[in-house]
Structure formats: structure tokens, C-alpha cells
Image (cartoon, rainbow, N blue to C red):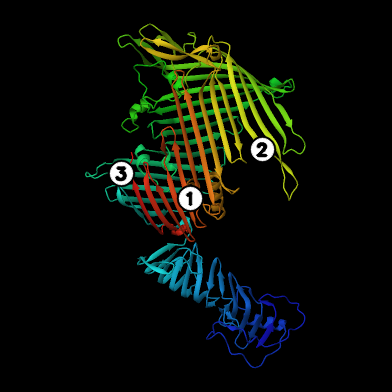
Amino acid sequence: MLTLFGQAVFGQETEKSRSGELDLAAPDSLIRPAVEPDTLLPSLPDSVLQISPEELDAAIQEEIGDIATTINYYAEDSIVSDFAQNKVFLYKQAWFEYGNIRLDADYIIIDWENSELFASGLEDSTGVVQGTPVFKEGNSIYEIRKQMRYNFESQKAIISDVVTQQDEGLLRGETVKKTKDGSVYLSNGFYTTCDLVEPHWHISSSKIKSVRGKHIISGPFNLYFNNIPTPLGLPFGVIPDTPEEQTSGIIFPSYGEEQRRGFFLRDFGYYFAFNDYIHTRVTGEIFSKGGYGLKTASVYNKRYRFRGGLNIDYQKFQSPETAEQPLEYDAFWFRWNHNPETRGNSRFSAAANFGTKSYNNNILNPGNFQQTQQSDFSSNISYSKTFSGTPFSMSANLRHSQNQVTDEVNLLLPDVAVNMNRQNPFRNIRFEPLKTLNIAWNFNAQNSINNRITPELGVDPDLQQQFEELGQPTAPDVLPFTFANLPQLLRDADNGFRHTVPISSNFSLFRFFTGTASMNFTEIWYLDRINYYYNPAEERLDRILENGFNRINYYNSSFNLATNIYGFYTFKEGSKIEAIRHHIQPTFGFTSTPDFSDPKYGYYQEVQINSSGRMQRLSRYQGFIYGGAPMGESKALSINIRNQVEAKVRTESDTAEAETKKIPILQTLNVSTSYNFAVDSFNLAPLNFNTRTSLFDKKLSVNLSANFDPYATRTFTNGESKVTRRISEYAWNNGQGLGTIRRASLNINGSLNPSKTEQSPGEVRDELTNEFLNQGGQMNDFVENEINRIANDPSQYIDWSIPWNMNFSYNLSYNKAPSGTSNITQAVNISGDLSLSDKWKINFNSGYDVAAARITQTMIGIARDLHCWQMNVNWVPFGRFTSYNIDIRVKSNILRDLKVSRRRSFFDNF
């Protein structure tokens, strides 16, 4: 037997040049194996031979010549070789490598004759075991608490007390057998996703089998919390251990209770992994009082080509006859998204989102509080193509918009556009106005299906003007958008074609000015036009549609002149504010448009509108999809002045040199108006004003806009009633001040928290997406929905490192009609979270409608970090979706169905 001390590494392939010999000595008697092996540890011979490293290598090479790959081993303290029994003993921080396996332990025995390894820890002088084995095979890691035997030819092992990682979970067993294919058999084992030595929870079973890359199967098991058994368990358990794109299986339901629909089982079904490109999830739900639902969700993904998802949800419910407040509905919702990879000259994409009003009114989505408050939904399916080698491109869109409050639905089926990019026919000419002259062509075709009811009888010629003055159109009368009404909706569809030819040129004037001259030609095609006629019997204005091809041509020209003016205000040296810069960008424009309401064009009709014989000129294309030609001549001078003010501030520090930074005072301040020389009244247009800035290091954003009317108003007597209207006289000439503010709005948005790294929902969404992709994940509809839910719902995304966070907004809107009627709406919204301790957090989302004097939809949540679990309690105390939800779930994705949850909803307001 040979005993060597010091650092040494041996392998099948070793260095040939070595000098000197090592001294021989007896091993340390204080160090002994933690477990005495029965067969592998030999008795040491009495005689010790001295041998050189070269001779040792040769001897080892002779004994292990049949091994197919390189073997490396190492020991920090000593290596003891027994040639009589072909064994090597490694002591202290030793390791053994062979192929894709590596064994680390303080005590390793290599049995060359049987191709076996034995490993355990070592007890020190105090009896504490150190250096217990860690065995790695490929991506599998086994942390061994006691000992192991492993045959590196058959790749089988017997292990005592081991912990191994399986996907996102941990397996532990008293006695473990590992087979060549990587399957693991555990006796008296448990499974958990908690990585603590004493886990918060685990599933305990007398027999567990793990099949690598497929699943983990257990016999009868119980669920333990803090080593306390619970009555929760099943006769057997199956946990998937395969990549997500290969897993099919049963989806277990959640349960809960709603006041009107009763107890329920929700989201029970099956997940179909058809292949690597398409998956489908089919689930259903059932309620104790008679309701049911069916959902199907599919995702597809073809790498480097496209990806998308399709979701269909159908819900039906009818209250029992004994219900005091009966509820009945058939609800349906459809979602589809398709996202191609950018390649080639064509692109197809889709984002469809529509359904019945009853779905949004009655179906509570407990996982996304924000979605339950939406009232407007839109969809778009588009195809676009560019034609290589030409300036032409085309696109086709199918658009949909739906308002759940007014029930108005608008479909554009289709919306086609063909465009020619701007061309410069005189780009080689030196004269700048011709050199920069460009021309383009755009063609649009639309077919619009809208369920807004347009009465053919009793046309009000002033209806549109009244809406514009009030600034608050009333909800339209609509035809229910059902299959039964579809033929009428198709008959009433609006369609048209439009050509536009913009011509423009840019050039410099007098060094400091930039001039832009442009002319726009428009031609519209319709297949109908309106004929108005006065009905004396009913004393009303009616209309009738006349079929036939109609062309509408109109044009306008404009010239704009712009420049930049800079003003600097400097302060005394040593002042904290070094300078203020004022940037002014004035733009002057002149626009000329003929009067296309002249009878010679035929675009308008002079018609009697009342019994007194009053005549009025009305457009034959009023309400059509592209409108008609503009009415009235215009020779208008427009003025727009844009301002920007920022300060240069010195920042001082005790540890660094003084620096300067720019602080916005006014990010923008715009004032605009125009004067029309061609009209005989109301020449001056209202003054439009808007400004935007941010304060407190961009923590607070302020937006203010207003519309100022310079004309006076006067009250007229119309029979027994009085009417107040604008008159073509300036307010300051009639003792009414400078004018009247017709419209104004104020928006204040802010975010407060003690951290400078707090992220917006968009930033959170991008970060979670990038993190998921970096971990090798594949984006699909389910993943995107989960990321959006976490990013947008404060009850789901919790940053435990920030003690508190608050987002708030204030919105004020003011409208005043010439009649004196005014309308004010204002609302305050607030959301955020507050840490009560390192593990407890309260989150909230609420608001107050000042005009209606009521609190808006409110959600209050409590979150508790339970290490490997998380508890969320969400409460909606009032409103349409009054409910509470208690949810305790494992953080691991593969055990997201292992949860303790209780829901109860109260649909008390409809």
C-alpha cells in the first residue's frame, strides 16, 4: 500500500515529466470516515512500499485500461492507494470526475476492480460530520446527507438520505436507488419547492418514483405544513417534470362561492400539447344554482415565423325561479392575437377582442381587477405588403370597436390602403424650392358597419352643431348587434373610396426662416347621395338616398413660415441657478380653400327646413364615411407659438465636484389661433392653449389645456322661450370681458415612493418578459396574460423591497355652451401599497368621482410573504363586483394549482 500526503491529482492522462519523490508517512489518526463501509474499506497491509509517481501512473493505467474516458480525481489532504485490492482512498475536499459525473466528498473510495465509488463525510475530533457527498450527473445534482455507492459503468447508485433538484422542486428520501436512465426510487421520501433545510411544507409518501424528463409519481401522500400533517392528500400523485411544450395532462379546478350563482368548480379540464407548435387548454366550470361555462385557449408558435393565441369563453346562467332578483344571460367573449416575425415584404397580424355586453357586466375576473373596469374594446386584423423596387405599398385592415356602456359597435370590413411614397422629380435641380418638391399618392377604401340608428324622417339640420356647442353628445340610439339584425346592418353599411395627392416643398428664407409650401388634392367616390325635401304635411325635413356613382373633388393650399428664437437669462456667479433658457418657436401659416358649397359644384343642396320658409344649405354627404367637401371659403392666417423654458441648476456635494443639470420649468406651452379673411362673421377662431410640465424630479406631471372664445353672446326671444347664442361681436366691445372659456381640462399625475428605482407597469412588463426569455422560456398567450396581470394589478405584483408606494391622478374637465349651460367633471384616482413589516403589505386601488359624489370601484388587498408560499387577500367592498378572495399558493410555477383558496362574490348592483 502507498500513502501520499499533500495536493495531488491523478488521471488516465497525466503529465510525463515529474521530478523528485514524495515522503511516506502514516495517515492522521484523528480523521476517520463518518460511516464505516462494510465491503469497500479494506484492512491496510503492514508493509508500505515507496514508489515514484511515474510508476504509480503506470500501475493505474494498467489496471484501468478498459475505461472508455478520462478519469480525474483529487484530494486536498491525502491519497492512499492499495494495489492489492485495486482501491484508492481520497481524504478531505476530494473529488472524482468520469464523463458527465462528478463526486465531491471528504471521503471517497475508488474500487477499480468493481468500477464502484463509495463516498461519505468525515467526523472531526468533535464528532461533527464534515464534507458530505455532492453527486452531479449531467444536470442532476444529489446532495447526500450520509453515504452513497455508485457504479460508474452501470451508472446505478444506492444512496442514504439524499436531496435532489427536480425542475423547480426538491426530492428527499431516506433510501434512494438511481438507475442508469436517471430514474430515482425513494423510500420514505417527500417533495417540496421550499429550499430551506426544514421546509415550510412538503408532500410525504412512503414510495416516490421520479422519471427523468417525464414526471414524479407518488403513492398515497399527505400534505404537511411545518412538519404537521394535514388531512389533505390523495391515493396517488403525478407531478410533471417535462418541458412545458411537451406536457399534456389534467388541469385541476379551483373552488369558491358566489352569492347568486352559488358554489362552483372552476377551470377543470385538460391541457393538450399536440406538438411543439400548438397547445390547447379546454376547461369548464359549473355552478350549484344552474350556471355553467366552457373555455378553450390555444397557443401556437413557429420559431422565426409567427406566434399567437386564440381564446373563446362561453358562459350561461339562469337563476332559479325562487330567486328574489333573477339573473339570466348568455355571455360570450373572443380573443385572438397573432404576431409575426419581421421578415420578407409582407406582414400579417391580428389582435381581436370582442364579445357580448352581458359578459362584461356579469362575469367577474378575479385575477385582473383592471379588466373588470374597462368599457371600450377594440380589435384589428391587418395585412401589409411592400412591393420591392417600387415606391408602392398596401395594407388591408379589419377593424372593430365596441363600447359596453352605449352598446355602439363599429366594424370596418375592410379598410384598404394603397400608398405611393413621396417622390422628388426635381431632386437634381439646384433651385431649392424645386429640388425639395415632392409628391405622393394615397388611396383608401372603407366599408363601415355601424349599429347607430340614423332616422330617415325628421332630419334636424342643427343636430351636429348642437352637439359641438354642448361638447357632450348624448348616447346614440343603437340597433342590437345580433345575427337576426345582421341583414339590416349590412344594408345600412357605409362605404367609400378616397384619393389624396399631397404636394409640398421645403426651403430656407432669409437664413433664419424655414418655409413650407403645400397643396392637397382630394377626390372621394360614393355609391349614394342624400336628397333632402321638406314635408309640409308633417312640417319636417326628410331625406332619401339616391343610388349612383358620385365624385367629390376639393383641394386646398397652404404656406407656413417657422423660425426659432432663444432667450437666455443668466444669474450672478455663485447662484444655485446659473441660467434660464427660453426657446420660442413661432409658426405662421396661410391657408386657402374655395367655397365648395357653391351650387356649381353640386355637393350641397339648398332646401327649406321649416314652415316659415327658412332655407339652409346642407351637404349631400352628411354622415358619410369620408364626409363631403368643406363648406365656406377660407383664406385664413394661422399663428402657433410654442414655448419651452428650462433652467440650468448647480448641484453641490461634499464628496464630489459641483455639477450642473437641466431642469424643465415648462416642457411645452403652446398658443394657437387663426383669422379667416374670407368670411363675413366670426373671423377670429377661438384661442387654444395647452401646457405641460413636470415637477419634483419628474415625480409630478401637470397638463393643462383650454379653449378661449373671444366672441360675445346675446339672448334672443323665440316665442315664449329664450335662446342664448354667440354673436359676431367681440366680448370686450359688449362689456363681457375678454371672452369665455368654452373648454378646459387639468390632469395631474404623480408617483411617490422612497425608492428611485420604482418601475412603471410598462417597465415591469418588459423586465418580466426579458427575465422569462433569458431563462429559456417561450412566450405564448398564457405567459403574456400572466405577465400583464402581474404588471397591471397591484395585488399581484409586489416589490417587497420598497416600504411604500403611491400613484395618484386628478382629472378636471370643464365645458360651457354658448347657451350658458356648463358641465364640470372631476375625479381623483389613487393606488399603491404599504409595507406593515418585511413580510406584510397592503395594496389598494380606488378613486372618487367628485361630480357624482361617490367612490369609484375600489379594491383593497393584503399580501403576506410566506417564503415558498404567498398569501393574497383581495376585497372589493362595494359596486358591481363586490367580492372577496383569499388565496394561498405555492410560488412554484409547476405547482400553481396547489393552493388553498376561498372566493365569494356578491353581484348586488346591476
Quadrant where the N terminus is found in the figure = bottom right
> Horizontal placement of 477 versus 584: left or right?
left
- Nearest-to-viewer mark from 1 and 2: 2
Packing grade of label 2 (10 A; few <14, some 14-19, many >=20) is some
Q: Which mark is residue 663?
A: 2
Mark sitting earlier along the chain (2/3)? 3
Q: CA distance from mark 3 to mark 1?
A: 27 Å
Is residue 595 visible to the viewer in this orientation of the structure?
A: no
Residue type (three-letter) at the residue carrying disc 2: Ile
Q: CA distance from mark 1 to mark 2?
A: 40 Å
Q: Nearer the viewer, residue 177 or 132?
A: 132
Residue type (three-letter) at the residue carrying disc 1: Val
Q: CA distance from mark 2 to mark 3?
A: 57 Å
Whether the residues at callouts 2 and 3 have beta carbons within 8 Å, the answer is no
Packing grade of label 3 (10 A; few <14, some 14-19, many >=20) is some
Q: Which mark is residue 351?
A: none
Mark sitting earlier along the chain (1/2)? 2
Name the residue at 71% across, 83% down.
55
The correct choice, above or below, for 402 with respect to 865 in the image is: above
What is the x, y in percent for residue 590?
Answer: 62, 16
Q: Nearer the viewer, residue 834 or 215?
A: 834
Name the residue at 43% across, 42% down.
371
What is the x, y in percent for residue 340?
Answer: 52, 43
Residue furthest left as drawn? 322
How many marks are shown on the rendered structure?
3
Residue type (three-letter) at the residue carrying disc 3: Lys
Label 3 sits on residue: 316
Quadrant where the C terminus is found in the figure = top left
Residue furthest top as drawn? 613
Q: Which mark is residue 783?
A: 1
Which element type, helix, strand or loop, lies under badge 3? strand
What is the x, y in percent for residue 777?
Answer: 52, 54
